[in-house]
Image: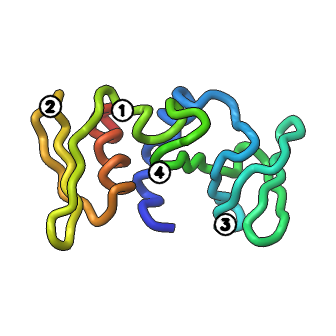
Amino acid sequence: MENLDLYERLQKVFREKMGPEQIGDRIFDTRDNMVGFIASIDGNRLDYITGNAYWTMKWEVDRLPLPIDPVNPERGLLGMLNGIPHLWKATDKWCLRLVAKNQYLECKSPTEALLRALCTQEGV
């Protein structure tokens, strides 16, 4: 999974900003090393789908919010940032300018740029 180290650093932030797990949330099952989407929630048990159906426990997953959540924008990476960053493609990299901090980040993908911006904002 690309950028897993950044997602792991932000787990506490995701839990605070996203609230409880919801059906449709993207997760990483740390027990089975699989990415999926939550299909149902029963207490502490999460059923999720990849190409097949699996289940795990809430404490065995990392949250993987979408870069932009079309249903609940505040639960996506962009919605968790204070202010809208400037993001653009420059040859072989993505550049992001954090206006509030007047700081530039160079990244391999837009998702990495949003994750690194959130790490900077939250101090993790």
Q: Which residue is mark 1?
A: 81
Q: Secondary structure at mark 1?
A: loop
The x and y percentages for residue 50 are 73, 66
Kind of residue at disc 4: Tyr
- Sequence-wise first label, 2 or 4: 4
Q: Which residue is mark 4?
A: 7
Residue corresponding to mark 2? 101
Mark 4 and mark 1: Cα distance apart in space: 15 Å
Secondary structure of the residue carrying numbered label 4: helix
- The first of marks 2 and 3 along the sequence is 3
Q: Is residue 14 left or right of residue 50?
A: left
Q: Secondary structure at mark 2?
A: loop
Secondary structure beneath dot 3 equals: strand
Tell me the quarter of the picture where residue 103 sits.
Answer: top left
Amino acid type, label 1: Leu
Q: What residue is drawn where x is 21% and y is 42%?
A: 86
Nearest-to-viewer mark from 2 and 4: 2
Q: CA distance from mark 2 to mark 4?
A: 22 Å
Going by the image, does 124 lie left or right of 30?
left
**Marks 3 and 4, how far apart in space?**
14 Å
Neighbour tally class for label 4: few under 14, some 14-19, many 20 plus, Cα within 10 Å: many
User: In the rendered structure, which disc, 3 or 1, sits on the residue that comes first in sequence?
Assistant: 3
Q: Return the mark for residue 34.
A: 3
Disc nearer the start of the sequence (3/4): 4
Residue positioned 63% across, 51% down in the render = 26
